[in-house]
Amino acid sequence: MTDTVVRSNTPATNRRTPAGGAPTAPHTPDEAGEPRIDIDAVAAMLRGTWGDTRLTVRELIKDPAYWRIDGQSVAEHRERVMGQVRLLAQNGGSSRALPPEYGGLGDNGANLAGFEELVLADPSMQIKSGVQWGLFGSAVLQLGTKTHHDRWVADIRDAKLPGAFAMTEIGHGSDVAAIGTTATYDPETEEFVIHTPFRAAWKDYLGNAAVHGQAATVFAQLITNGVNHGVHCFFVPIRTADGELMPGVQSEDDGVKGGLNGIDNGRLAFDHVRVPRTNLLNRYGDVAADGTYSSPIESTGRRFFTMLGALVQGRVSLDGAATIASSLALHVAITYGNQRRQFDSGAGTDEVVLLDYGKHQRRLLPLLAQNYAQFFAHDELLQKFDGVFGGTHDTPAEREDLETLAAALKPLSTWNALSTLQEAREACGGSGFMAENRLVGLRSDLDVYVTFEGDNNVLLQLVGKRLLADFAAQFRGADAAKLAKFAARQTAGKVFHGAGLRSLGQTVADFGSTARSVELGLRAEQQHKLLSDRVEQMIADVAGALRPASKLPREEAAALFNLHQAELIEAARAHG
């Protein structure tokens, strides 16, 4: 946290606040002694695998051109952010992940690490750039093929072709497979007809849709020869370079939001809009001129989830951005707490700094420790992402693990960011409520992080289902003796196991020494085992409760799952 970029943003001067951005305190702190740790070494650890990229971006966004100006109108903020995205493009911020043949570095990990740091300047700029390159651009890159890359990637990279990512609809957000937009193939003209059949099928909450977007990657039900082949992605022009809507395209502005008002979120609808057959992003499914459908993945369900898995970087990057935002909040609050003095010490000397009070330490320092742990977990997630998308570890199993880990960590980090920002705001008193000190603005901007790129509870349910599948897999082909042994072990150990204490309790008995047992309990490997045991028991309990579902009618099975949904989500949280 020592080299985190912090800035102030007053409308008149954009002046920096003292102490690297912490709110002004009435007294300066006492001169500190020598630190007991190597601060530079810790700072390097907290920059992670792509530390050089993080430092480069932090240096870049020290330029006030990247800062938010509080007090701007929504329209002014939107135009400023669009200009910032173009400025990022000019400074290479859009090309790290692109293949070298398109002017990039092919470094997926560095790309997300750099993106995550942008939250320090203005979350609106960060998310707007994420829409442009991480969603719209990534859809073209990951779901399209070389023909599409050659046509559009350069202009997307340079922000000459701003675009929207049109997946969510008014009526369907998390349930993407059920979206209503259709893309019906016309073999006579070799075109797809993109159509919004009813109001609930309007695409909604789309960045770049209200003002700046000239194209959209539209997710729609692909229908050819009377057969629905499920959700596919299409490149659809929506505006001219002059900002005029294309024929058949309708747009509405979502208006003022609770945060991120530098982004022009809006709705899109399509009235029988025709696009060429070649505008289907056809990496996972294609349609020939005569309307024949083909795909390298035979299963419709597996094809759908493979397509969505190719876009997992949004969840990975939000996990990182939420962690960085929490770091910033703690930097501000802890610096303030180490300067602000309140009440006499009783020794007739200076008033006591807030951070010397036990309660103040307990409200901030555990959050600091959690933030460190969160960053290290994120860095491992980022390494896994880089391995999969960089091709060094790209297997179906690795992709599935990546998707599960991202779905587990993103909810925990985004929820934690909101609680950390609120605690930091309160710990700074009235100063924490001032816009120039960032905390209230960050809290508003990050609020939506818990529901976009996947609602947090829905993501944890996905994690829970994966855990159930892994749990069931260990019994495939098991004989009766193995199953009986497992049942006996579960019954005998349930009380201790459920609390995560079975093995630790045995250790106390074996050692006969509380001190030695406590020392063992502080070891990382023992703590990991305790937590893993707890998750295993929670999943075993849910699995046992759901076992009758396989023999029930579909409606009754769904009701049984719904009855135990909360326990499954709690198990997924424990796993994360």
Image: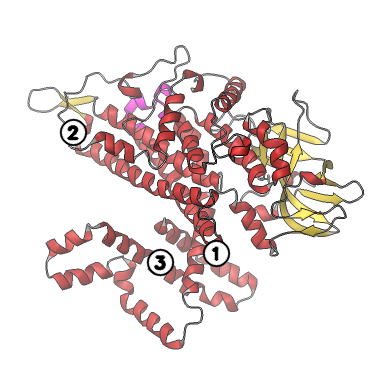
CB atoms of marks 2 and 1 within 8 Å: no
Nearer the camera: disc 2 or disc 3: 2
Residue furthest left in the image:
347
Q: Earlier in the sequence, mark 2 or mark 3?
A: 2
User: Looking at the image, which residue is at 54% across and 31% down?
Assistant: 93
Residue under pointer 1: 562
Q: CA distance from mark 2 to mark 1?
A: 53 Å
Q: Quadrant of the C terminus?
A: bottom left
Q: Earlier in the sequence, mark 2 or mark 1?
A: 2
Amino acid type, callout 3: Met
Tell me the element at label 2.
Answer: loop
The numbered mark at residue 2 is none
Q: Earlier in the sequence, mark 1 or mark 3?
A: 3
Q: Left or right of 535: which side holds 525?
A: left
Amino acid type, callout 1: Asn
The numbered mark at residue 538 is 3
Magenta stretch encompasses residue 329 = no
Q: Nearer the viewer, residue 87 or 437?
A: 87
